[in-house]
RNA sequence: GGAGAGGUGCCAGAGUGGCCGAAUGGGCUUGACUCGAAAUCAAGUGAACGCGCGAGCGUUCCGAGGGUUCGAAUCCCUCCCUCUCCGCCA
C-alpha cells in the first residue's frame, strides 16, 4: 500500500509515477472520496465529542443527585445522527481502502522503462553455456530415461502440472534444498525458519497477494478458510506483521524451505511440458527485514546470495532488472535471475529478488522504533528465491547431462548425495 | 472431540456501567545524590487518525466483530486465540 498522505498531497506526482508501469490512477475518484472523507470524518468526530461531553454531564448530574431527565432530552436524537454519520464514514473509508489496496507500488527511479518483459534490462551474465558434442536432451527426456521423473503417475494422483520424482532424482532434489539452506544459514547469516504452509487472508493481504490476485491461489473449502502459500514470502514476511521491532534487531535475515502452491490460472498452454510450471513446487526463500535506508543495499546483497547458489552449482545465468511494465504488484524493484537451460536454448527465470520498500510493511504494520526519533517507523521488506528448487533441478539435469544420459553431480551436492559423482550411469 | 479457566499498556497485575487511556508494582528514560556504581528520591514513559502554519484541540483503540445504554475495559451475543485436565493422534 502506498502512503495515503503521499497520495493526498502529491496525487498527480503519484499518478505520473504509476503511469510508468502502465497503471492508470483514478485521480478524480480519489479526490472526490478524499474530500468526502474529510468532511464526514470531521462531522462524525464532532458528534462523538458532543456525545462524550453530554454523557459526562449526565454522570456528574446523577452523582450529584440532580434530575437528569432534561439532559437526556437534550441528547435525544444525537445517537441517531452519530450512527448515520458513522455509517457514512465507514462507507467512504471502505471505498478508499479498497481503492488503496488495489494500487501497485511505485517503481524505483533505477527501474528501466518498458511495457513488457522484452524491455527488461540485462545487468550481467555469469558463466558460459556449455558446448555439447552430442545432441542435448531436455530434463523431461533425461528424467524419463532415468525412470526418475513421472508425469503420468502424477496426473493419475492429482492432475496436470504435478510431478513424481523417484530414486536419485528425488534425492538430488532434496540435496539441492539442503545445499541452499546450509549455504544461506552458514555463510549468508540467515536464520532458518519452519512456517505454516496454510495461512489466513490477513497474511496474504499483508504481502499483497490479496485482495487482487485471489484467483492465483489455492484455498481450503472448510469452515475455516485457509490459503496454501504461493511462496514462503507470505508466512516468513508476515512474522513481523503488527510488530514494532527494536532497531538493534535489524536487519532480520530469514530463510525457509517450503512447498509453494499456485493455481497458474491464465497460464494455459504455457510451459506445459516438464517441471518448469507446476501447481506445487519447492522453494528456498530468503527474506530480509531492514531499515529503510538499507533496503537497496540489502536487495543487491540478497540477489548476490541467490547468485552464489547458481555459481557454486556451475550454472550459467544472467541477471535481469525487470522493467516498469513487468514489475510485480508489490515490488519497487526486482532482479530476476535467469538460468541457462540447454534443453530450451534459453535463459529461464529461477529466482526473483525484490525490494518492496514500505509497501508490504504498511499493509502489515511492520515497524521498528527509530532511535533518532523514538517513534515507530515502517521497515522495508526484501525477498528473493534462493532458489526455486524444481527449476534448479531442471537446470542441473540439463547442464550436467552426459552423452549416455547420466547426470554428473555438481561437486557441492556430492556431500548430500552420499558421495555420488553422477546419477544414472 | 469433552470439561474448565482466561485474553487489559514493554512485563506483571487491578479495575465488573460514569472525570479510566486505564490503579499499583516492575522495567525503561531523564534528573538529583555519588569519584563512579548500587541504593534512594523526583519526573517522564502506548499506538493510530483527523483538524490547525503553530501552540494545540479532538477522535478511536482494554483479543475481533456486533448489540444494550445518555454513557461500555466493565452487561449481552457471535467468533478467534491461549492455558489446564481427559480422550484421540503423526
Image (spheres, rainbow, N blue to C red):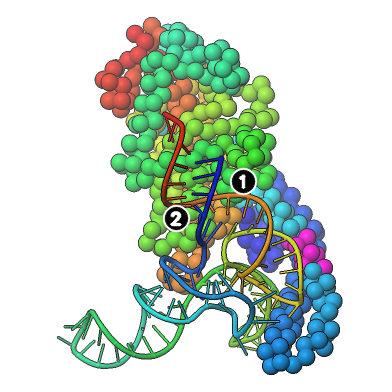
Depth check: give the residue in front, A209 or B70. B70
Mark 2 — residue? A290
Mark 1 — residue? A201
Q: Position of residue A365 (x, y in %)?
A: 55, 58
| Mark sitting earlier along the chain (2/1) | 1
Q: In the rendered image of this protein, does residue A195 appear above or below residue A52? A: above
Depth check: give the residue in front, A97 or A47. A47
Residue in view at x 65 percent, y 35 percent: A221
Q: In the rendered image of this protein, does residue A193 appear above or below residue B50? A: above
User: Left of A330 or right of it: where is A345?
Assistant: left
Indicate yes or no whether the magenta region holds residue A92: yes
Quarter containing the C terminus of chain A:
top left
Give me the C-alpha separation between circle 2 and circle 1: 24 Å
Label 1 neighbour load within 10 Å: few <14, some 14-19, many 20+: some
Residue in view at x 64 percent, y 36 percent: A222
Residue in view at x 49 percent, y 32 percent: A259
Between label 2 and label 1, give the one nearer the viewer: 1
User: Left of A295 or right of it: where is A60?
Assistant: right
Q: Which residues are magenta?
A: A84-93
As helix, strand or loop, the secondary structure at mark 1 comes to helix
Q: Position of residue A363 (x, y in %)?
A: 59, 55
Q: Specify whether residue A330 is in view.
A: no
Amino acid at each position: 500500500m502506498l502512503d495515503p498522505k503521499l497520495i493526498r498531497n502529491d496525487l498527480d506526482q503519484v499518478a505520473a509515477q504509476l503511469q510508468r508501469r502502465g497503471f492508470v490512477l483514478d485521480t478524480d475518484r480519489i479526490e472526490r472520496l478524499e474530500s468526502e472523507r474529510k468532511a464526514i470524518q470531521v462531522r462524525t468526530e464532532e458528534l462523538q465529542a458532543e456525545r462524550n461531553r453530554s454523557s459526562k454531564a449526565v454522570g456528574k448530574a446523577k452523582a450529584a443527585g440532580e434530575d437528569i431527565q432534561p439532559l437526556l432530552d437534550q441528547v435525544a436524537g444525537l445517537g441517531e445522527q452519530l450512527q448515520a454519520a458513522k455509517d457514512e464514514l465507514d462507507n467512504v473509508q471502505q471505498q478508499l481502502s479498497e481503492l488503496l489496496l488495489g494500487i501497485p507500488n511505485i517503481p524505483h527511479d533505477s527501474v528501466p522503462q518498458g511495457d513488457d518483459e522484452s524491455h527488461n534490462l540485462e545487468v550481467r551474465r555469469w558463466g558460459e553455456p556449455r558446448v555439447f558434442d552430442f545432441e542435448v536432451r531436455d530434463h523431461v527426456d533425461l528424467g524419463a530415461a532415468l525412470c526418475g521423473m513421472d508425469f503420468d503417475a502424477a496426473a493419475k494422483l492429482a492432475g496436470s502440472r504435478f510431478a513424481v520424482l523417484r530414486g536419485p532424482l528425488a534425492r538430488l532434489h532434496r540435496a539441492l534444498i539442503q545445499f541452499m539452506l546450509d549455504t544461506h544459514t552458514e555463510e549468508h547469516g540467515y536464520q532458518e525458519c519452519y512456517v505454516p504452509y496454510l495461512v489466513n487472508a490477513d497474511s496474504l493481504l499483508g504481502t499483497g497477494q490479496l485482495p487482487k490476485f485471489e484467483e492465483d491461489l489455492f484455498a481450503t473449502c472448510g469452515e475455516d478458510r485457509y490459503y496454501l502459500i504461493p511462496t514462503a514470502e507470505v508466512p516468513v514476511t508476515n512474522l513481523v506483521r503488527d510488530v514494532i521491532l527494536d532497531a538493534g534487531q535489524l536487519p532480520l535475515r530469514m530463510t525457509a524451505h517450503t512447498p509453494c502452491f499456485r493455481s497458474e490460472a491464465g497460464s494455459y498452454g504455457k510451459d506445459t511440458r516438464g517441471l518448469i510450471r507446476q501447481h506445487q513446487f519447492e522453494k528456498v526463500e530468503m527474506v530480509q527485514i531492514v531499515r529503510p535506508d538499507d533496503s537497496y543495499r540489502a536487495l543487491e546483497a540478497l540477489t548476490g546470495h541467490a547468485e552464489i547458489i547458481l555459481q557454486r552449482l556451475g550454472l550459467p545465468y544472467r541477471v535481469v532488472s525487470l522493467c516498469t511494465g513487468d514489475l510485480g504488484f508489490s515490488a519497487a524493484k526486482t532482479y530476476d535471475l535467469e538460468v541457462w537451460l540447454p534443453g530450451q536454448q534459453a535463459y529461464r527465470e529461477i529466482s526473483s529478488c525484490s525490494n518492496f520498500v514500505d509497501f508490504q510493511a504498511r499493509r502489515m504494520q511492520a515497524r521498528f522504533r527509530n532511535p533518532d526519533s523514538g517513534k515507530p517507523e515502517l521497515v522495508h521488506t526484501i525477498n528473493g528465491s534462493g532458489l526455486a528448487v524444481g527449476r534448479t533441478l531442471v537446470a542441473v539435469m540439463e547442464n550436467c547431462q552426459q552423452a549416455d544420459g547420466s547426470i554428473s553431480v555438481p561437486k557441492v551436492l556430492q556431500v548430500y548425495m552420499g558421495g555420488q559423482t553422477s546419477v544414472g550411469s
